[in-house]
């Protein structure tokens, strides 16, 4: 069995790490590069940086961020936020990112997944999916959860895999920031229907939630933000707990 990964996520707005509940009510959580370096030292397996700033200078902003992060980290990191083209990705990978994350642009233009996989390799392409339940169905949403689409979770992730995505980062918007546990039933459904890794996001609040997401949710990685940013759970303690429970983790 491949070791399960623990991944802190840093949402960035105007150069600062922020965290909210259900995608709103953001509060400051510190400098993203400093936080990233701390997580690298504390045993995180990977990091995800998502820039939620609305700016026309997005490509330059993200490239500068990627360069700064790469100087201070010795673990892989994924970067995303407003990526829409091959040129965007080329700049980010050249700037030191290990993987890139796409979301809205892929829903609007699914061919982008194929183009990125063909030009850079599937291993660099993470498809982020934000979904919540509407009338009992998991519906894909855009624009920070404000815009529902016609896409349903399972058919979209299966299409993404077929088009060349190398990994799925699924965030349950119903669970995001609640610290009430991950969407394990939906995660298991996604994991069982795909052959690529699935990163679980949204709902981490306790160490038990990570055990549940790896066993019940069948996720390959568990991602969280505020519990790490505000030192509610230390990564070393979490890994020790998971090892004691028989879950294979790194380090």
Image (cartoon, rainbow, N blue to C red):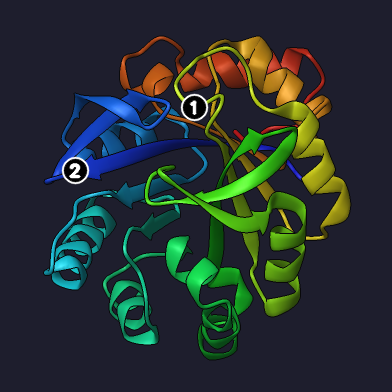
Q: Earlier in the sequence, mark 2 or mark 1?
A: 2
Residue 129's place in the image compared with 55, above or below, is above
**Which residue sits at x=58%, y=76%?**
110
Residue 149 pos. (x, y %): 55, 56
Between 43 and 84, the residue placed more toward the observer is: 84
Numbered circle sitting on residue 13: 2
**Which residue sits at x=31%, y=28%?**
24
Residue linked to disc 1: 176
Residue 8's place in the image compared with 120, above or below, is above
Classify mark 2: helix, strand or loop: strand
163 on left or right of 31: right
52 on left or right of 44: left
Graded by Cα atoms within 10 Å as few (under 14), some (14 to 19) or many (20 or more), the crowding at tag 2 reads: some
15 on left or right of 62: left
Among the 4 quarters of the image, the one containing residue 145: top left
**Which residue sits at x=79%, y=14%?**
245
Total count of labels: 2
Classify mark 1: helix, strand or loop: loop
Between 140 and 249, the residue placed more toward the observer is: 140
């Amino acid at each position: 069995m491949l070791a399960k990964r623990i991944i802190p996520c840093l949402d960035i707005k105007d150069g600062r790490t922020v965290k909210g509940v259900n995608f709103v009510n953001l509060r400051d959580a510190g400098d993203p590069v400093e936080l990233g370096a701390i997580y690298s030292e504390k045993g995180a397996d990977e990091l995800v940086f998502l820039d939620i700033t609305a700016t026309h200078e997005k490509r330059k902003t993200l490239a500068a961020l990627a360069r700064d992060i790469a100087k201070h980290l010795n673990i892989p990191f994924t970067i995303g936020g407003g990526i829409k083209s091959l040129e965007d990705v080329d700049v980010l990978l050249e700037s030191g990112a290990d993987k890139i994350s796409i979301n809205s642009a892929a829903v609007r233009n699914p061919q982008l997944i194929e183009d990125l996989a063909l030009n850079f390799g599937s291993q660099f392409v993470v498809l982020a999916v934000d979904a919540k339940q509407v009338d009992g169905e998991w519906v894909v949403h855009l624009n920070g959860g404000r815009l529902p689409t016609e896409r349903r979770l399972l058919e979209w992730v299966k299409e993404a895999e077929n088009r060349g995505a190398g990994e799925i980062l699924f965030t349950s918007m119903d669970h995001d920031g609640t610290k009430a546990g991950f969407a394990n039933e939906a995660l298991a459904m996604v994991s069982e229907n795909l052959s690529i890794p699935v990163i679980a996001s949204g709902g981490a609040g306790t160490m038990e939630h990570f055990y549940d997401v790896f066993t019940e949710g069948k996720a390959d990685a568990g991602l969280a933000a505020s519990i790490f940013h505000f030192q509610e759970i230390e990564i070393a303690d979490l890994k020790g707990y998971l090892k004691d429970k028989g879950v294979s983790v790194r380090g």
